[in-house]
Image (cartoon, grey):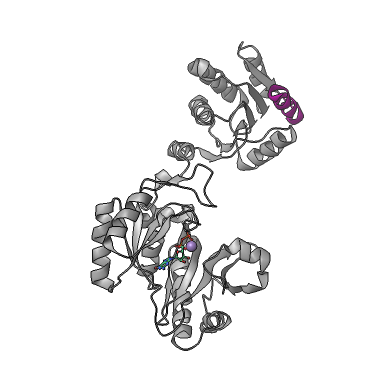
C-alpha cells in the first residue's frame, strides 16, 4: 500500500525523524489558514504548496510551488487543487489532485549552504537483509543518477536481527561528506529512519531529498512510503491511511470481492486458478501474439458465482478483446467450473461481447468439455495448452 507524502511524514515524525512540517488543505481557504498556523508555529515566512498524489516527480510537473505571501498561497493552492497533474511517473492522463500539503519553507538562507541527499531503506530479498541506499545526488531522479553516475550511489546492508549499528550510521554520514553538527544529525536521522521502516512494517521508505539546512539540521523534505499489505492487519492506523482514489478502480472492486486481480495493459483477459498457472498463462498469451490484460487468480473455490464475478471484473476493462479461462481442476472439479461458466454466460447475456476460450484440465475435464461444447454458447473449448494458445491467436486475428 502506497501512502501520500503527508502520511509518510506523519509516520516518520512519530519515530523521531525530523521532517519539513506541513498541514494538509483541501481548498484555498484551508490553505491560507494552514499557512498562518505554520507561520505561528515555525516562524516560516514563505510556504511550499505540494500536490498530494501517489506519484513522484511532482516538482517537474508543476505540482510543487513556492509562495512568498498569503495571497500567493491562496492563488497557487487554487491552481493545484483540482488540476490534472502529469509527472514522469503518472500515466499520460495524469492524476487528479484532491489535496495539497502546505509546508514550511526550509531552504532559507543561513551560515552554510543547503544541500540535498537521497536516502532510502528497502528490502534486499536476495540477501535477506535490509538495505540503506544513499547518495550525495539528492533532489534528482535517482534512476538517472544510477544510470549516469552509479559510483555516487552507496549502499549499507543492515542485518535485520542486529539492526543498524552506530558505526554504520557514522559511515553513511561520512560518505555524504558531512561534519560537525550535520554529521551528528545525519547519524540520528538514518537511525530513526531505519527504526521507522522496521516498526511500521514498510517495504520502502524513500526520502528524496533529505535536506541539510543552512543551519545544519537534517530533515525529510519528501517521503515515499510503501507499507507491506500483508502487515496491515496488525497496523490498523496505517490501514486507515489507504486512499482508494489513488488506486486502480477495477483492482479495488476485485479486492472487495476477494479476487486476486492486477490490471495490466494488454488485450486478453485471463481467469486462472493458482498464481503459478496464471503466470504461465500470461506467457502463453504473449507467445500467441496477444498481451495479457490482467493477472487474475480466482483461487481454489471457482464456483459459478465466483466465475461470474470474475467475468464481470475482467469485462470492466475496455481493452479486453478476448478472455482465456485456464483452470486446473484439482480440488475444484472441472465440470463445476464449466457449469459456472455456462451459467455466468447465460446470466450475463449480451454483456459478453468478446470471444471466450476455455481450457479445463484435471478432474472431470472430459465432462466439462462436453458441457461447454453442448451448451450452444459461443465458447471455444481447448484441452491442451497449445490448443488454447492457437485459439487465442485465431480470435485475435
Ligand atoms: P517531487 O518532485 O514529487 O519529488 O517532490 P519533492 O517533495 O521532492 O519536492 C520537489 C522539489 O521542491 C525539491 O527537490 C525542492 O527542490 C523543492 N522544495 C521542496 N520544499 C521546498 C522548500 O521548503 N523551499 C524551497 N525553496 N524549495 C522546496
Ligand atoms: Mn522528491
Q: Indicate whether residue 113 is drawn in magenta.
A: no
Ligand 1 lies in which image quarter? bottom left
Name the residue rendered at 57%, 62% in the picture: 141
- x and y percentages locating residue 147 in the rendered image: 67, 63
Name the residue rendered at 40%, 44% in the picture: 245
Left or right, residue 81 beside residue 261: left
Q: Quick one: which residue is furthest to the bottom in this view?
A: 180
- x and y percentages locating residue 335 in the rendered image: 60, 22
In this view, 360 is above or below 13: above
In this view, 387 is above or below 126: above
Which quadrant holds residue 12? bottom left
Which quadrant holds residue 355? top right
Q: Which residues are magenta?
A: 383-397
Viewer-closest of 309 and 22: 22
Q: Inspect this view and state whether residue 326 appears.
A: yes
Viewer-closest of 244 and 298: 244
- x and y percentages locating residue 299 in the rendered image: 55, 37
Q: Quadrant of the C terminus?
A: top right
- x and y percentages locating residue 333 in the rendered image: 60, 27
Left or right, residue 354 beside residue 97: right
Viewer-closest of 105 and 298: 105
Does the magenta stretch mainly form a helix, a strand or a loop?
A: helix
In this view, 284 is above or below 28: above
Amino acid at each position: 500500500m502506497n501512502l501520500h507524502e503527508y502520511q509518510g511524514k506523519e509516520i516518520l515524525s512519530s519515530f523521531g525523524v525530523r521532517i519539513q512540517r506541513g498541514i494538509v488543505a483541501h481548498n484555498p481557504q484551508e490553505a491560507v489558514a494552514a499557512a498562518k498556523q505554520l507561520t505561528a508555529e515555525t516562524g516560516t515566512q514563505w510556504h511550499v504548496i505540494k500536490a498530494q498524489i501517489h506519484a513522484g516527480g511532482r516538482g517537474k510537473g508543476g505540482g510543487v510551488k513556492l509562495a512568498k505571501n498569503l495571497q500567493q498561497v491562496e492563488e497557487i493552492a487554487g491552481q493545484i487543487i483540482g488540476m490534472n497533474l502529469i509527472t514522469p511517473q503518472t500515466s499520460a492522463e495524469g492524476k487528479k489532485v484532491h489535496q495539497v500539503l502546505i509546508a514550511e519553507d526550509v531552504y532559507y538562507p543561513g551560515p552554510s549552504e543547503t544541500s540535498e541527499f537521497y536516502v532510502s531503506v528497502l528490502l534486499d530479498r536476495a540477501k535477506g537483509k535490509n538495505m540503506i541506499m544513499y547518495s550525495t545526488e539528492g533532489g534528482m531522479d535517482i534512476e538517472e543518477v544510477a544510470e549516469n553516475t552509479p559510483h555516487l550511489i552507496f549502499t549499507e546492508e543492515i542485518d535485520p536481527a542486529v539492526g543498524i549499528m552506530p558505526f554504520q550510521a557514522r559511515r553513511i554520514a561520512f560518505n555524504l561528506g558531512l561534519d560537525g553538527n550535520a554529521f551528528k544529525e545525519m547519524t540520528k536521522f538514518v537511525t530513526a529512519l531505519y527504526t521507522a521502516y522496521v516498526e511500521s512494517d514498510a517495504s520502502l521508505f524513500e526520502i528524496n531529498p533529505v535536506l541539510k539546512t543552512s543551519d545544519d539540521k537534517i530533515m525529510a523534505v519528501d517521503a515515499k512510503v510503501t507499507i507491506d499489505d500483508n502487515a496491515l492487519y496488525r497496523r490498523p492506523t496505517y490501514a486507515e491511511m489507504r486512499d482508494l482514489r489513488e488506486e486502480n478502480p477495477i483492482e479495488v472492486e476485485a479486492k472487495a470481492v476477494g479476487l486476486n486481480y492486477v490490471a495490466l495493459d494488454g488485450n486478453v483477459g485471463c481467469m486462472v486458478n493458482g498464481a503459478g498457472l496464471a503466470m504461465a498463462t500470461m506467457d502463453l498469451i504473449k507467445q500467441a501474439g496477444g498481451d495479457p490484460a490482467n493477472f487474475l487468480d480466482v483461487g481454489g473455490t471457482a464456483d459459478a458465482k465466483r466465475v461470474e464475478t470474475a467475468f464481470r471484473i475482467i469485462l470492466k476493462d475496455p481493452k479486453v478483446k478476448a478472455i482465456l479461462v485456464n483452470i486446473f481442476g484439482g480440488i475444484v472439479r472441472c465440470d463445476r467450473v464449466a457449469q459456472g461458466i455456462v451459467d455466468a454466460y447465460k446470466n450475463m447475456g449480451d454483456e459478453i461481447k468478446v470471444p471466450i476460450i476455455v481450457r479445463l484440465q484435471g478432474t472431470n475435464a472430459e465432462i466439462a468439455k462436453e458441457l461447454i461444447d453442448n451448451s450452444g454458447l459461443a465458447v471455444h473449448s481447448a484441452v491442451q495448452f497449445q490448443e488454447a494458445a492457437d485459439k487465442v491467436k485465431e480470435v485475435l486475428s
